[in-house]
Image (cartoon, helix red, strand yellow):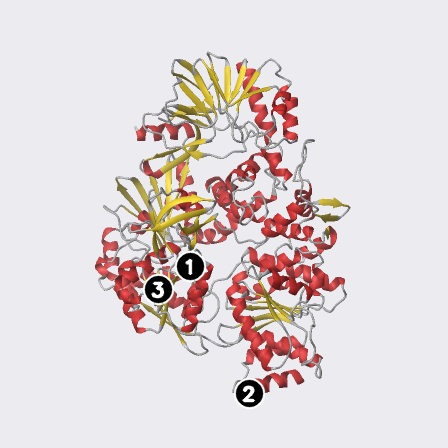
């Protein structure tokens, strides 16, 4: 379960099957699109999706934290799904286990809660973040923005593999497009959108508990 | 007795005499019985029950029946089609006026205006014609029992259309409640009647309507037979006719003389895209048809459809290209010819379509069969034989549809609330839910009040409130949302298509539009359109001058072959092989059969043919059981799984109604020696569960279930894309239920529906038993055969693997090199 270490733009990116990246130079865990609170948002509206999803998602994040001991966690947007609800309170309790780890949220279109809630949760928020000239922004950009490279989320990328005898598979992936890496969605309660990668753009698919370079 | 005299003399004045079955129905009704009337369309089945109610009313008020106004709702007439409702109301009103009975006939459907609804609420008409959905919407209103205070009779019209569907379950549930109200108010039991065309299981159909507590119900059969003349149109150049395909356009030149020689023709196609293509092609081939040709399918603007229906009545149309949208419904008297393009896949459907022509009693229904590929001609011969032998399919009733029950309980919760014990009794006496256990019921109630397993202290689930055993929804927002979502017909998210300059064209699946780039051209409602942009769930278009356009392919167009027709089909192949046949269809196919025999083999009744063929795509294995697509899908998966136990291998699977294909990138180890073991029924149940991708099948079934049960929020009409944060695909919901709540009854329902309706396990077992006593013939043709061709080029695909995911990915990567 160590994933695949990808040396790219002079940095070491450890691509993890848990749908996260461990950035060795910065000792940072990068995740995207957690959509915390989504299940409760549905349940409050009378739609009985299972209530246990958030606990599973946070438990997975917790295991990554204990394994890699990061000093910071970078979230490239859509950390919370909607307005404040009790899943947010649950997160607050969970958050207290790691008072020394900095959580940095690059705000996504779903992150609509008032700023004071984020400070109560001990989360730093900003529209973008730049470290070692690597840029973090929620929505991917299709052009050269002057930084060494960019990391984004938003799309919940999936990759379709087709082969002989008309075989076909669709899996979540890390998609390193020309100017920007798109991270898979971390939350379990999220869907997939198929990416059309150019032939020279690296794509890593998540196949069960391993990460495999698909192209 | 006075009532019957009045009616018969009124008929006599018109020089009419009641049919025997009508009199029988009147008699049974006056005795207070319930039952089912079985009669073909066009023979006055409506009058067999409507007049029975009128007769009883006259008998009850012999002096006053012309003077009594505002009597409250007496007769509830459930009709599956809105279009039908209008026609029936018109006929009933005419009769009542002639008899000078001052009854009102009201219609209640999605089209009924708000003001009409309001006046109906103040004073219910004596007769209300209603769709199953609108009936449930009535049950979702405060004080709904007041509407039904005087109700004596319920008629379910076209019951054969409703049984076997979740709309039929809605009728069962509504009846259970109406019976319950009647009992609570100590009124005499309701008389419940159905009207049905002939189906294989009429007795059962009646039981479903009656529920488990009604005995003493009768079936009244009209001993009347419809004259149907089936003519196959045999391709002029049989040797050049394509082996595969599903459009049948090559037959167009031979269809035109038929159309020209008839007064009005309905041309049935099996899919909407096919109808669009036929409409365009007919118009191109015959420009003089302009103005006299029309298109009718489910995606066309309702106003336009109504116009087409009116024009059909008035006889100003020469031909209408249509789909199942015109299967049912009102009589179009000018129609004297029906053309069926491609196989209708079932005897009942074919009879129904044939019956759309020659609608008057004793007229001959003319139907022409146009094959879309060569082998389909065999189906025409099979249909003819099945019709002669009255081999009509059964419609299996739906059992334990939890999604519909959840919706129904929410309906009761938003109106007056419900006492769980009373409703439990009512629901358990319906046919659909007779096997519901107390545990199921508790789960259902919990799902609505606490949202299933509520193990978490931070849970905020809201839907219904419970006090003791009384359940009610107090949220106005949820109640409003629920009322808008009552119903069980689930379609894809549809987008309106409008011209930039204004003007409405029709509706189309969102998924189709999302694949288009601005500037692309497509065809809808017989027009060539250029896609410009989408905005607020509307696709804006302008007229296109492009010669090449895309015809959208709509989902769900494909219906599998029924087992009756499959059985007949095998018999016809046998006849063809015996060379003693007199069927013109089989004689025309003789050259094709000869080629098949040369390249491979034609299976006899007691044989199963298997072909190994190698092409640049890989290694193909074709198997021909002739059992219909659904059985083939499951059988293919089972065979693939059993082979994959011999060696690690991945297959892609394809099937049509005649057989199936396993395709692999490595040779397939099936031989004459091991083939019997591969088709055994030993360990069938366990191996089926292991082999069939039941998860994928269930996932497909779950989509409708999630919508019906209220898990998918579709937004308010006219307020699209609001509440973005409540959007989730059914596939995603399926995943989270599977991973976090595997005991969810809705999930189990999805698997059950997959097993019973999709997999047809019983039919599969019969097929395997048949194969066990058959001879298996394995051939190695040099090239593709006439039998395998349609499977290879024109079929749906699936995957089956015994290789590890990582190995598969490595192979796929290597293949993409």
Q: Is residue B592 left or right of residue B402?
A: left
The residue indicated by pointer 3 is: B380
**Up-down relation of residue B677 to residue B357 (above or below):** above
Nearer to us of marks 1 and 2 is: 1
The residue nearer to you, when weighing B653 against B451, is B451
Nearer to us of marks 2 and 3 is: 2
Q: Is residue B221 visible?
A: no
User: Residue drawn 40% across and 40% down?
Assistant: B799
The residue indicated by pointer 1 is: B297
Question: Based on the displayed image, in which of its 4 quarters is residue B56 positioned?
Answer: bottom right
Q: Is residue A113 left or right of residue B321?
A: right
Asked which secondary structure carries label 1, the reply is loop
Please tell me which of labels 1 and 2 falls first in the chain. Answer: 2
Asked which secondary structure carries label 3, the reply is helix
Q: Chain of mark 1?
A: B
Residue B402 x/y as whole percent: 61, 49
Q: Are marks 2 and 3 in contact (CB under 8 Å)?
A: no
């Amino acid at each position: 379960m160590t994933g695949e270490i990808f040396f790219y733009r002079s940095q070491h990116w450890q691509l993890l099957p848990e749908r996260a990246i461990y950035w060795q130079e910065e000792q940072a865990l990068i995740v995207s699109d957690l959509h915390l609170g989504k299940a409760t948002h549905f349940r409050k509206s009378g739609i009985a999706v299972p209530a246990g999803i958030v606990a599973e998602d946070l438990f997975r994040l917790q295991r990554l934290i204990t394994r890699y001991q990061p000093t910071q966690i970078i979230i490239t947007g859509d950390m919370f799904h909607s307005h404040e609800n009790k899943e947010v309170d649950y997160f607050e309790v969970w958050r207290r286990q790691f008072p020394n780890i900095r959580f940095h949220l690059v705000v996504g279109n779903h992150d609509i809660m008032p700023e004071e809630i984020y400070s109560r949760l001990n989360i730093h928020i900003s529209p973008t973040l730049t470290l070692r000239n690597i840029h973090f922004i929620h929505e991917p950009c299709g052009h050269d923005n002057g930084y060494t490279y960019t990391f984004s989320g938003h799309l919940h990328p999936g990759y379709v593999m087709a082969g002989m005898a008309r075989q076909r598979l669709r899996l979540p992936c890390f998609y390193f497009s020309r100017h920007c890496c798109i991270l898979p969605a971390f939350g379990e309660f999220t869907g997939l959108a198929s990416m059309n990668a150019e032939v020279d753009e690296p794509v890593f698919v998540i196949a069960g508990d391993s990460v495999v370079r698909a192209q | 007795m006075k009532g019957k005299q009045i009616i018969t003399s009124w008929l006599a004045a018109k020089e009419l005499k009641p049919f025997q079955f009508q009199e029988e129905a009147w008699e049974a009704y006056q005795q207070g019985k319930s039952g089912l009337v079985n009669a073909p369309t066009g023979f006055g089945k409506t009058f067999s029950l409507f007049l029975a109610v009128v007769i009883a009313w006259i008998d009850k008020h012999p002096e006053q029946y012309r003077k009594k106004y505002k009597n409250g709702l007496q007769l509830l007439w459930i009709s599956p089609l809105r279009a039908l409702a209008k026609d029936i109301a018109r006929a009933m009103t005419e009769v009542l006026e002639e008899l000078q009975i001052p009854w009102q006939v009201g219609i209640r459907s999605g089209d009924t205006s708000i003001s009409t609804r309001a006046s109906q609420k103040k004073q219910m008409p004596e007769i209300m014609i209603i769709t199953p959905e609108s009936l449930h919407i009535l049950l979702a209103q405060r004080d709904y029992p007041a509407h039904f205070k005087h109700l004596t009779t319920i008629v379910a019209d076209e019951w054969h259309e409703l049984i076997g569907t979740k709309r039929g379950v809605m009728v069962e549930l509504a009846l259970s409640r109406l019976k319950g109200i009647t009992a609570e108010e100590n009124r005499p039991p309701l008389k419940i009647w159905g009207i049905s065309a002939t189906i294989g299981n009429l007795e059962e159909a009646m039981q479903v309507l009656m529920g488990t507590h009604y005995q003493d119900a009768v079936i009244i059969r009209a001993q009347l037979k419809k004259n149907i003349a089936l003519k196959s149109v045999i391709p002029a150049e049989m040797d050049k006719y394509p082996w595969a395909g599903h459009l049948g356009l090559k037959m167009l030149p031979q269809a035109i003389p038929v159309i020209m020689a008839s007064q009005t023709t309905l041309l049935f196609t099996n899919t909407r895209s096919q109808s669009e293509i036929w409409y365009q092609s007919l118009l191109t081939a015959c420009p003089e048809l302009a103005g006299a040709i029309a298109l009718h399918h489910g995606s066309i603007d309702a106003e336009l459809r109504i116009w087409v229906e009116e024009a059909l009545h008035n006889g100003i149309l020469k031909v209408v290209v249509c789909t199942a949208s015109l299967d049912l419904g009102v009589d179009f008297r000018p129609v004297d010819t029906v053309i069926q393009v491609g196989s209708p896949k079932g005897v009942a459907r074919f009879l129904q379509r044939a019956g759309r022509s020659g609608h008057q009693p004793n007229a001959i229904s003319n139907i022409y069969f146009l094959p879309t590929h060569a082998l389909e001609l065999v189906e025409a011969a099979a249909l003819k034989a099945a019709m002669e032998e009255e081999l009509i399919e059964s419609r299996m009733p739906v059992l334990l549809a939890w999604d519909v029950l959840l919706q129904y309980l929410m309906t009761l919760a938003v109106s007056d609330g419900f006492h769980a014990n009373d409703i439990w009794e009512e629901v358990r006496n319906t046919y659909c839910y007779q096997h519901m256990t107390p545990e199921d019921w508790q789960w259902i109630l919990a799902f609505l009040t606490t949202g299933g397993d509520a193990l978490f202290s931070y849970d905020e689930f809201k839907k219904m409130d419970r006090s003791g055993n009384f359940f009610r929804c107090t949220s106005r927002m949820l109640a409003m949302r629920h009322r808008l979502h009552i119903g069980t017909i689930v379609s894809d998210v549809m987008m309106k298509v409008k011209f930039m300059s204004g003007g409405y064209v029709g509706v189309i699946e969102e998924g189709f539009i999302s694949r288009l780039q601005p500037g692309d051209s497509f065809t809808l409602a017989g027009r060539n359109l250029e896609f410009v942009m989408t905005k607020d769930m509307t696709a804006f278009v302008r007229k296109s001058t492009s010669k090449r356009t895309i015809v959208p392919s709509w989902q769900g167009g494909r219906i599998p072959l029924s087992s009756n027709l499959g059985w007949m089909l095998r018999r016809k192949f046998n006849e063809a092989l015996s060379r003693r046949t007199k069927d013109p269809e089989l004689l025309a196919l003789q050259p094709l059969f000869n080629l098949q025999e040369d390249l491979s083999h034609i299976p006899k009744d007691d044989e199963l043919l298997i072909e190994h063929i190698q092409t640049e795509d890989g290694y193909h294995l074709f198997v021909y059981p002739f059992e219909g697509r659904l059985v083939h899908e499951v059988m293919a998966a089972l065979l693939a799984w059993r082979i994959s136990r011999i060696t690690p291998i991945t297959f892609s699977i394809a099937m049509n109604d005649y057989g199936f294909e396993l395709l692999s990138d490595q040779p397939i180890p099936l031989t004459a020696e091991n083939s019997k073991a591969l088709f055994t029924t030993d360990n069938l149940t366990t191996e089926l569960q292991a082999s069939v991708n039941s998860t994928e099948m269930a996932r497909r079934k779950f989509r409708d279930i999630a919508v019906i049960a209220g898990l998918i929020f579709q937004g308010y009409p006219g307020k699209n894309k609001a509440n973005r944060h409540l959007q989730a695909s059914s596939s995603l919901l399926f995943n989270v239920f599977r991973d976090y709540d595997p005991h969810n009854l809705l999930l189990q329902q999805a698997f059950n529906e997959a097993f019973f309706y999709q997999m047809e396990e019983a039919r599969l077992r019969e097929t395997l038993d048949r194969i066990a006593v058959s001879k298996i013939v394995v051939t190695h043709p040099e090239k593709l055969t006439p039998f395998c061709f349609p499977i290879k080029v024109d079929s749906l695909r699936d995957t089956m693997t015994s290789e590890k995911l990582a190995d598969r990915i490595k192979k796929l990567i290597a293949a993409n090199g």
